[in-house]
Image (cartoon, rainbow, N blue to C red):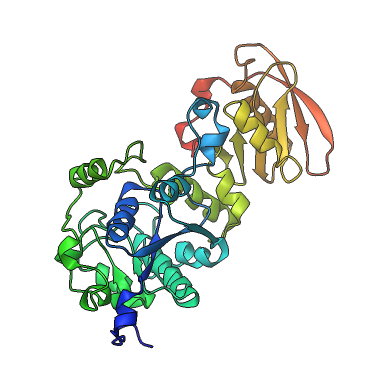
Amino acid sequence: MSASAPLPTTASAASTPRKAVALISGGLDSMLAAKVMLEQGIHVEGINFYTGFCVEGHTHAIRREHQLKPKRNNALWVAEQLGIKLHIVDVIEEYKDVVINPKHGYGSNLNPCLDCKGFMVKKAREWMESHGFDFIITGEVIGQRPMSQRKDTMPVVARESGAFDRLLRPLCAKLLPETLPEREGWVDRAMLLDFNGRNRKPQMALAAQYGFVDYAQPAGGCCFLTNEQYSHKLADLWAARGTKQYEIDDIMLLKVGRHLRPRPHFKLIVGRDEGENNFLNGYRKRYAHLNATSHTGPLVLLDGQANDDDLLLAARLTARFGHGRDAERVEVAVTDLSGTTRTLTVAPLPANEIPAEWYL
């Protein structure tokens, strides 16, 4: 059956609750969109696609500065507040082509927002069709995102995803053409909304009306690719390897530690606290690594090829970022990929000898 084909409207069909799959990011908008549908008696289940670039949950569980803060997966929390099922789907491998070869290009950083939205809706459509659901809902609002949430790009997402008019955006539906769920009477268009622009006050007011509190920051992004510093580190990774490819461990490591590239052929990933040191410790067998033995300090992974002069520089930087930074000499253990360890006794590199361009 095509996306816009008319459906039977017998009494039995009309009395059967329609089913919608909602893209749940963990933010306020998708939460409200799902709630608007629940209020109309629609059976809603959520779907969340894991790309590896999600902001929440990972670094918050590692960094010491976050240890006293509540840790939660916001998508799961939203589903719990709504009382709906949430399906979390791993799309790491499929998503690579979106990041590496975006048809519609990148945003201000390495964020392929329009391609990303089309990909997510396409995957939701496939799930909808295989699970017997009727339509898809998202929390999109016209004018909210400069690349993917414009009135001229919303039809692009609907078309390229194959969802067509089975894609309903409850928060701004009154500003868009009628969709199949509205024409068929599954949902009441009069009860949909006309939110527009980047002002989040209407969403916050609606959240208060529904009694939602402690939700994720309304204007917060959920993807590291929108972050300038993260995108710079990813671009550096691609440039150093000479190919726009990555594995899940690559993109996870870009989220952790202080990254420096003192030479074109190697970079250092420096743990910033005990939590990050513990995380980086899991990669000790995959990278050459350094750590001070005479003073407390970071674990440092070395990504690339380094000669003896490079290792001396890496050892001095390792000493610089530890508690021995003001000591005359610091002992640093250097372990290569074979597991062989040797000790270098070095003078910590002074801060004024670390050029700003080394920091990624």
Between residue 48 and residue 52, name the one nearer to us.
48
Q: How many marks?
A: 0
Q: Is residue 291 above or below residue 86?
A: above
> Based on the displayed image, in which of its 4 quarters is residue 8 positioned?
bottom left
* Residue 289 at x, y percent in the picture: 71, 36
- Image location (x, y in percent) of residue 37: 30, 61
Query: Is 287 rendered above or below residue 194?
Result: above
* Residue located farthest toward the top when viewing the structure as drawn: 327
Residue 58 appears left or right of 80: right
The part of the image, by quadrant, that contains residue 321 is top right
For image coordinates 45% across by 77% down, the residue present is 129
> Toward which corner of the image does residue 207 lie, by quadrant?
top left
Residue 258 appears in the picture as rendered: no
In this rendering, would 195 be left or right of 114?
left
- Where is residue 316? Give x, y as percent: 65, 25
Q: Nearer the viewer, residue 28 or 281?
A: 28
Residue visible at 78% across and 44% down? 337
Q: Residue at x 74, y 36 (%)?
A: 308
Is 353 in front, or is 214?
214
Q: Quadrant of the N terminus?
A: bottom left
Residue 136 location (% of width, % of height): 36, 68
Residue at the image position 18 percent from the left and 67 percent from the top:
189
Q: Is residue 191 visible?
A: yes
Q: Is residue 33 above or below residue 307?
A: below
